[in-house]
Amino acid sequence: NLGATVRDAGPIDRKTSELIQLGVAAATGSEGSVHSHTRRALKAGATKLEIYHTLLLLISPLGFPRVAAALSWITDILDRA
Protein backbone atom coordinates (compact mmCIF):
# COMPACT_ATOMS: atom_id res chain seq x y z
CA ASN A 1 0.00 0.00 0.00
CA LEU A 2 2.94 2.35 0.52
CA GLY A 3 3.58 2.73 -3.21
CA ALA A 4 -0.05 3.60 -3.95
CA THR A 5 -0.22 6.00 -1.01
CA VAL A 6 2.91 7.88 -2.08
CA ARG A 7 1.84 7.96 -5.73
CA ASP A 8 -1.62 9.28 -4.94
CA ALA A 9 -0.44 11.86 -2.38
CA GLY A 10 1.75 13.88 -4.73
CA PRO A 11 1.28 16.26 -7.64
CA ILE A 12 2.74 13.94 -10.29
CA ASP A 13 0.08 12.38 -12.52
CA ARG A 14 -0.21 8.62 -12.96
CA LYS A 15 1.26 8.54 -16.48
CA THR A 16 4.35 10.51 -15.47
CA SER A 17 4.74 8.37 -12.37
CA GLU A 18 4.73 5.19 -14.46
CA LEU A 19 7.25 6.65 -16.93
CA ILE A 20 9.57 7.58 -14.05
CA GLN A 21 9.26 4.10 -12.61
CA LEU A 22 9.91 2.64 -16.07
CA GLY A 23 13.15 4.60 -16.23
CA VAL A 24 14.22 3.31 -12.82
CA ALA A 25 13.33 -0.25 -13.80
CA ALA A 26 15.54 0.12 -16.88
CA ALA A 27 18.34 1.62 -14.79
CA THR A 28 18.30 -1.34 -12.43
CA GLY A 29 18.17 -3.84 -15.29
CA SER A 30 14.93 -5.45 -14.16
CA GLU A 31 13.23 -6.95 -17.21
CA GLY A 32 10.10 -7.89 -15.29
CA SER A 33 9.71 -4.38 -13.88
CA VAL A 34 10.27 -2.86 -17.32
CA HIS A 35 7.49 -5.08 -18.68
CA SER A 36 5.20 -4.19 -15.79
CA HIS A 37 5.76 -0.43 -15.94
CA THR A 38 5.40 -0.43 -19.72
CA ARG A 39 1.98 -2.05 -19.37
CA ARG A 40 1.05 0.34 -16.55
CA ALA A 41 2.23 3.38 -18.52
CA LEU A 42 0.08 2.36 -21.48
CA LYS A 43 -2.89 1.87 -19.18
CA ALA A 44 -2.25 5.34 -17.68
CA GLY A 45 -2.40 6.88 -21.17
CA ALA A 46 1.24 6.99 -22.28
CA THR A 47 1.84 6.66 -26.00
CA LYS A 48 4.36 4.27 -27.49
CA LEU A 49 6.44 7.29 -28.48
CA GLU A 50 6.46 8.60 -24.90
CA ILE A 51 7.59 5.20 -23.64
CA TYR A 52 10.41 4.99 -26.19
CA HIS A 53 11.44 8.58 -25.43
CA THR A 54 11.58 7.81 -21.70
CA LEU A 55 14.22 5.19 -22.36
CA LEU A 56 16.11 7.18 -24.98
CA LEU A 57 16.57 9.95 -22.40
CA LEU A 58 18.60 7.44 -20.38
CA ILE A 59 21.31 6.83 -23.00
CA SER A 60 23.64 9.45 -21.58
CA PRO A 61 23.40 8.50 -17.88
CA LEU A 62 23.09 4.72 -18.32
CA GLY A 63 24.91 3.99 -21.55
CA PHE A 64 23.67 2.57 -24.80
CA PRO A 65 23.97 -1.15 -23.96
CA ARG A 66 21.67 -0.96 -20.92
CA VAL A 67 19.15 1.20 -22.79
CA ALA A 68 19.26 -1.13 -25.81
CA ALA A 69 18.36 -4.03 -23.50
CA ALA A 70 15.45 -2.08 -22.02
CA LEU A 71 14.27 -1.09 -25.50
CA SER A 72 14.10 -4.76 -26.44
CA TRP A 73 12.09 -5.46 -23.27
CA ILE A 74 9.52 -2.73 -23.95
CA THR A 75 9.17 -4.03 -27.50
CA ASP A 76 7.97 -7.34 -25.98
CA ILE A 77 4.98 -5.40 -24.62
CA LEU A 78 4.50 -2.70 -27.25
CA ASP A 79 4.36 -5.20 -30.12
CA ARG A 80 1.27 -6.71 -28.46
CA ALA A 81 -0.37 -3.35 -27.66
Image (spheres, helix red, strand yellow):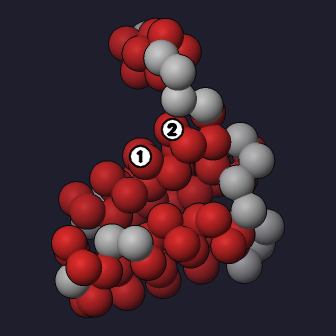
State how far apart marks 2 and 1 are (Cα).
Answer: 6 Å
Q: Specify few, some or many for label 1: CA neighbours under 10 Å numbering under 14, 14-19, or 20 or more.
A: some
The residue drawn where x is 44% and y is 54% is: 22
Query: Image quadrant for the C terminus?
Result: bottom right
Dot 2 and dot 1 residues touching (CB under 8 Å): yes
The amino acid marked with disc number 2 is Ser
- Which residue appears at 32% of the width and 53% of the height? 24
Question: Callout 2 environment at 10 Å: few (<14), some (14 to 19), or many (20+)?
Answer: some
Residue 80 in the image: x percent, y percent? Answer: 76, 72
**SS at badge 2:** helix
- Residue wearing tag 1: 21
The residue at 61%/31% (across/down) is: 13
* Position of residue 68 in the picture relative to residue 8 (left or right): left
In the rendered structure, which amino acid carries the disc numbered 1? Gln
Residue 32 in sight from this viewpoint: no
- Quadrant in which the N terminus is drawn: top left
SS type, badge 1: helix
- Establish if 16 lies above or below 72: above
Residue 53, x across and y down, in percent: 54, 72
Q: Is residue 2 left or right of residue 74?
A: left
Find residue 23 and report its horizontal and vertical position in percent: 38, 58
Mark 2 — residue? 17
